[in-house]
Amino acid sequence: MAATVACTAARLGHKILRVRWVWATTSGTTSASGGSTTFPITGEILGIKAEPNGTNKPADNYDVTIVDAINGMDVLNSDAINLPQALTGVGNIRVPVDSQNSRPIYLVDETLSFAGTALNGGAGDSAGTFYLYIREP
């Protein structure tokens, strides 16, 4: 196993959708990608949460992008880069905003997938979970 990514989505109530990507890499593998959503997503991004595995932590300052299938663009506008490896790191919970006008990011019929880089510093396996919270219309 070099790298794996699995995606699940759940509606939490009150029109809140949680998309979860669980990723893992083995020693010497520094990136992971895949785990596409199984349906198009429409709504406002409320926040993101990164949870490094407590035992197999990623490298400090690892990067995550959530990529749309149509344009291949990071829908988070680089707001999930330089994430801390500590589970309690203050940078693990963020609210991405549009880089031009600081407004919430709104998705329209987007199929999304995970891409992570600098996940492993080469000292063994690494793993974590990444959450995206969306308010559906």
Image (cartoon, rainbow, N blue to C red):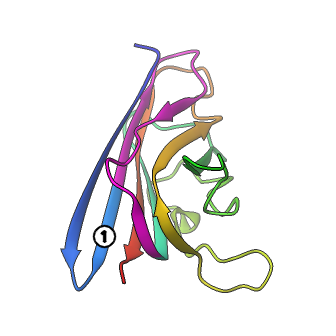
Q: On the picture, is 68 further left or further right than 57?
A: right
Q: Which residue is mark 1?
A: 17
**Residue 62 relative to residue 16: left or right:** right
Vertical order, 42 against 89 (above or below) = below
Disc 1 element: strand
Could you say where residue 119 lies in the image, as x and y percent from the top left? 58, 34
Query: As displayed, is residue 99 above or below residue 118?
Result: below
Q: Is residue 35 magenta?
A: yes
Quarter of the image with the N terminus in it: top left
Nearest the eye: 118 or 102: 102
Q: Residue at x 70, y 76 (%)?
A: 98
Q: Residue at x 58, y 15 (%)?
A: 28
Front residue of 90 and 32: 32
Q: Position of residue 53 (x, y in %)?
A: 38, 42
Q: On the image, which quarter does residue 105 sit in?
A: bottom right
Question: At 52% across and 33% down in the image, what residue appears?
Answer: 33
The quarter of the picture where the C terminus appears is bottom left
Magenta stretch, residue numbers = 20-43
